[in-house]
Image: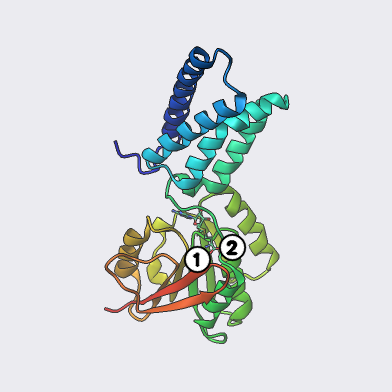
Amino acid sequence: MDFKGRRPLIIAFLAEFCAAGVTIAAVQGYFALVGTDMPLALKLVIAGMVAGGVAYILRATLPWCVFLALLPSLFVGAMILQLPLWVPLVILALLVLIMRNSLGERVPLYLSNQKTLDLICSLIPNDRPVSIIDLGCGFGAMPRALARYNTHPDSRFHGVENAPLPFLMAKPLAWRASDTRISIKWQSLWSVDLGAYDLVYAFLSPQPMPQLYKKAKTEMRSGTRFVSNSFTVPDHPPTKTIPVRSGRATELLIWTMSD
Ligand SMILES: C[S@@+](CC[C@H](N)C(=O)[O-])C[C@H]1O[C@@H](n2cnc3c(N)ncnc32)[C@H](O)[C@@H]1O
């Protein structure tokens, strides 16, 4: 069975189902051996390990495995604190709204740091028109930083995002910048025509890189650049690599497109 992170709810159901089954069996065994009820903490550890382990075996993304491992404790904690059942459900819904692509595309939300924004700015002229897109722009910091750096009125700084909460944050932040050259769209990166851009920036994960590189090669014009933060493409070494000198061990991988 190959779930590839595309069926997170089925994985969640299977993981928690197995966790409940194994924990119940362990409680019976414990009672038979020790003659008392198993301590609650031990039940939660067993349930968490089984849920996380099953999710991992079914190749769920790491944040989803961790969340499923913690879910039994969250529910029991909510019950002990006498919180209404909707509290953990709302937490779950918020996580899905923020991390939607961690479940489906295996791309979690983490943000480019200031050093990376500065480095991307240093790759472009500040006084000539450029057209740049951030594929999966999160809160839209990259298009805003580029727009502050490059002052040409004909430049375009685009971002696409399809996780609800990051998009809902990116939109007003872009409006607040009051710069019509910035545009944030609710759109999947897979439906963007990359041929319109001089530089395409992506900070995703290893999973989509081979397919995205293929798309970039097919659509991008000769001489334009595809830049990936940290994630490379197997068998396609970048034209250039620039280390990002920050706390994180990251680098920018740059492919200059040729005919
Ligand atoms: C690691 S974050 C990077 C955020 C931002 N680019 C930055 O550098 O700060 C990856 C982002 O890509 C988004 N994403 C993943 N797959 C996507 C898709 N198919 N279409 C649009 N956005 C996507 C995620 O929701 C997430 O916000």
Q: Residue at x 35, y 72 (%)?
A: 220
- Tell me the CA gap for discs 2 and 1: 8 Å
Residue 223 drawn at (x, y percent)? 36, 81
- Horizontal side of 77 relative to 65 (left or right) equals right
Of residue 3 and residue 202, the one placed in the foreground of this image is 3
Whether the residue carrying mark 2 lies under 8 Å from ligand 1 is answered with: yes
Q: Residues within 10 Å of mark 2 (few under 14, many from 20)?
A: many
Q: Is residue 236 above or below residue 139?
A: below
Pointer 2 with pointer 1, Cβ within 8 A: yes
Other residues around mark 1 within 10 Å, as few (<14) / some (14–19) / many (≥20):
many
Image location of residue 55, percent across then percent down: 42, 37
Label disc, if present, on residue 193 of the rendered structure: none
Residue holding disc 1 = 134
Q: Quadrant of the N terminus?
A: top left
Which residue occupies 48% across, 54% down?
187
Q: Is residue 47 above or below residue 182?
A: above
Total count of labels: 2
Query: Which residue extends farthest front?
Result: 34
Q: Position of residue 162 (x, y in %)?
A: 51, 51
In the displayed structure image, the side of residue 214 where residue 155 appears, left or right: right
Pointer 2: what residue? Answer: 140
Q: Secondary structure at mark 2?
A: loop
Position above or below: 135 against 100:
below
Q: Nearer the viewer, residue 129 or 8?
A: 8
Q: Name the kind of residue labelled 1 in the image.
A: Asp
Amino acid marked by disc 2: Gly
